[in-house]
Image (cartoon, grey):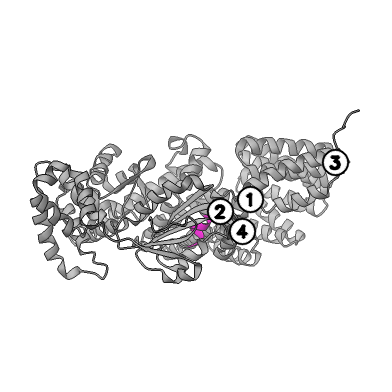
Amino acid sequence: MQTLTERTGLVVLTGPAGIGKTTLALHWLHRLKDGFEGQLFVDLRGFSGTGPLPPDEPLERFLRALGTGAESIPPGADEQAALFRSMTTGRRLIVMLDNAVSAAQVRPLLPGAGASLVVVTSRLRLSGLVLDGARFLDVPPLGEPGALELLEHLVGPDRIGAEREHALALVALCGTLPLAICASGARLAARRRWPIARAVAELDDEARRLAALRTGEGDISVDAVFNASYQALADAHARAYRLLGVHPGPDFDLGAAASLLETGEERAGELVHALVDASLLLEDADERYRFHDLVRLHARDKAAHPRFEADRRPALTRLADRYLSTAVAADLVLMPGRWRLGDRHTTVRGADVFDGRSAALAWLDRERDNLTAVVREAHGTGLHAVAWQLCEAMWPLFLQRKHYASWIRTYELGLAAAESDADPRAQARMLEGLGVAHLNLEDFGTARERYEAALVLERRSGHRLGEAAALEGLGSVALGGGDLSRAIDLFGAARDVHAVLGRPRGVALMERHLGDALSAAGRHAEADAALSGVLETFRHLDEPYHLARTLTCLGRARLRAGRLDEAAAALRESRRVAHDTGAPHVEAGALDELARVAARRGDPDGERHHLEQALAIYTRLGSPQAAPVRERLAAASPAPSPDPGP
């Protein structure tokens, strides 16, 4: 890295798998980090065997890390890339893009003009990045001295001194690749009585057997090392290695490992740590584990061997079952009153798994990539019902965190799984989830198509509760498009279904929609009556998020009706509940409406105060609502100048 005298711009590190590109880059960047204002890192999974990371996922992570609120992140990768460039222009950041597979994958993740440093690692040259001003550094193998030093660090200088020639032979058979040397060294370190010559003989024999498998990248030495390490494992550890390779996501915890291995977490921990000690697994923070991409492919290859093929599907089934049960528990904690189509909620108690809403939402967010990967794998292997039920259980995550691209991708997988399962109710449920996503994105045409298709399926299968959901969605589409009369009719029809079915929560949600629509139509008394009734329902059901939203709707309706004191009271309570619940966007909305109340009262100081508070929250969230609030603040009466005194 000493050849890279400049500390800004785009740098691409290339070299074969296992050469240590990531370690080298991280070591260099750690030395430089104090000169930058922030760091962004993502593994693009270009060679993971599970497909490269689509560009919207790292872009969404980066935008959130830079302070952009969920509602402010556009759905399309092109728009996200444009926002990322805008937010990073003129800033001094470190951006590390690990395991890239193409220039096209990297280009949307490049920051705007400024003094940022971008480091890309890849097995490929990525020569297309020349157009983006990239400088290239080929990372060669360690060379004999460096490789020998690494082996000495692992097994000790005494053993190297006693068998120097054999040590040289071993690092040569490893191709002097750090990953291979670590795997071989870990075996020797665990077997203090083994001579290095024994490892050399085994590895040399394995390499000869694998000669026909040589690839263009020269991976034969790595394959030979992994085979030798695998064959040296005890039977229980070898089985654990194969079954952990079944996991389709980027990482896992001991609970997931226990499910795959069909054992308790304590025993799973023993097996996992043995593989860490053998350098066949990597341990990250918070007791999470992952495979190097080459090792993952090797483990999967072993699991696919005819002798062990029968173990794969039961392992995946156990894993998917665990993720489904835990996701349902989180769903129950976050939204206890909503109806569910899947039957897992009848056997799971959310309070037994999560200590409150924050923990449940944090788990769903942390495991999102794994959950989506399991949905894909479950659908691909015929576990269709599990796939769509996982989507349904992820609903609170998507509704509250607004991972739009991931939301749509996951629910489209769920829809395909429901179709393969020949379950029309499940198909409709997935269509309704997609409708909400497109409604949030104000793509009213696509949302309408999804809801209309769902309504046909719900009515054909005689599912009244699902019919109400489709009618609600179509009502929201009509309201968004300004067709107030149709929105009122549709919300009323949906409310009537919930009333017949004896569902007070569903009735309350439809009444809130009706209150919004009636208020917008100028039917103030009806709107107030509807929204006041909704408040009592949500207080009784202990749903603070919906309570805060309803209070804002009521405050806005009373403001339109000219009842300023009552409007202010409802909005102040909305702000308090939203703040206590951790819903800053709802809090900012209440402050925004309180500013309008102050303006109607002729209170410019109060208007400015509330606008400034709302602007601070919207700015922190990176919300588009910040712009109109800023404009209103600029147009408001100026704050009085302080009295200069005598």
The residue tagged 2 is: 63
Position above or below: 241 against 422: above
Nearest to N terminus: mark 1 or mark 2: 2
Which corner quadrant holds the N terminus?
bottom left
In-front residue for pair 550/269: 269
Residue 108 at x, y percent in the picture: 52, 64
Name the kind of residue labelled 4 in the image. Ser
Dot 1, how many residues are within 10 Å of its Cα: few (below 14), some (14-19), or many (20+)? many
Q: Do the CB atoms of the residues marked 4 and 3 lie less than 8 Å apart?
A: no
Corner quadrant of residue 452 = bottom right
Q: Do the CB atoms of the residues marked 1 and 2 lie less than 8 Å apart?
A: yes
Please give the range of residues in magenta. Answer: 55-60
Q: State which mark lies toward you, 1 or 4.
A: 4
Which element carries disc 4, helix, strand or loop? Answer: helix
Position above or below: 285 against 292: above
In-front residue for pair 491/76: 76
Can the viewer see residue 223 in this picture? yes
Q: Is residue 574 left or right of residue 435?
A: right
Name the kind of residue labelled 1 in the image. Gly
Q: Farthest residue to the right: give it.
A: 646
Dot 4, how many residues are within 10 Å of its Cα: few (below 14), some (14-19), or many (20+)? few
Residue at position x 68%, y 35% in the image: 576
Residue 57 part of the magenta-drawn span: yes
Position above or below: 89 against 646: below
Residue 559 at x, y percent in the picture: 82, 44
Nearest to N terminus: mark 4 or mark 3: 4
Say which mark, if any, is on residue 622. Answer: 1
Say which mark, if any, is on residue 604. Answer: 3
Can the viewer see residue 344 in this picture? no
Say which mark, if any, is on residue 86. Answer: 4
